[in-house]
Image: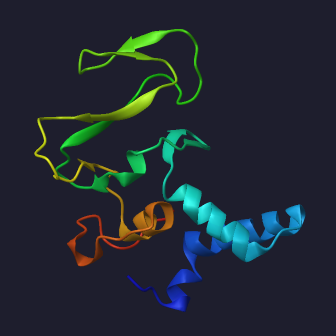
Amino acid sequence: VFWSPSRLSSGPFQARRRSLRSAAERLGIDPERLTWAHALVSTRAVGASINACALIPGVDLANHSSTPNADLVVAGEPGIRTGRATVTTYRKVWEHGSAGLVAKRDLVAGEAVRISYGSYPNQRLLLDYGFSLGSANPAGDLEETS
């Protein structure tokens, strides 16, 4: 998906660019390298809580689908081990701080693992996950702002 420069210069795209440019200046690093690193992390990270994310190996390999065949299971806060445990809806015990993918049914060898990234407009999917559903997205193209 290619978005025009005018579209990328508005809304959340521009706000994120300004924020990254400012951070690069404060840190004394190349803005293009910081933008690349930010994109690498943000398109592979899982939201852990407000203003926090976690990189969970393998989860970024799961494709998005409105009919997922797997779920992302998180116990407590990812990466924060407390010694407590959670019994998930899959009747498995997960130590707090752990996360992973659980198939909703038996998968066939070679079948893609699909999870739902959420029902978001293309603008947010592109900004946060690095892909767009194009005209097939029931949530549309642009995020509503108030």
Residue at the extreme top: 84
Which residue is found at the position 12% from the left and 35% from the top? 105
Which residue is found at the position 59% from the left and 83% from the top? 9
Q: Is residue 106 above or below residue 7?
A: above
Foreground of the two, 94 or 49:
94
Q: Quadrant of the N terminus?
A: bottom left
Q: Quadrant of residue 132?
A: bottom left
| Residue 67 point in image, percent of width and height | 16, 50
- Image colouring: rainbow
* Left or right: 138, with 6 as reference point: left
Any part of residue 104 in sight:
yes
| Residue 96 point in image, percent of width and height | 49, 18
Which residue is found at the position 57% from the left and 56% from the top? 41
Foreground of the two, 102 or 65:
102
* Left or right: 123, with 64 as reference point: right
Foreground of the two, 84 or 145:
84
Q: Is residue 133 above or below residue 85?
A: below
Any part of residue 144 in sight:
no
| Residue 23 point in image, percent of width and height | 80, 63
Q: Quadrant of residue 89?
A: top left
Foreground of the two, 104 or 3:
104
* Left or right: 105, with 72 as reference point: left
Residue at the extreme front: 109
| Residue 127 point in image, percent of width and height | 50, 67
Total tally of numbered discs in the picture: 0
* Left or right: 70, with 47 as reference point: left
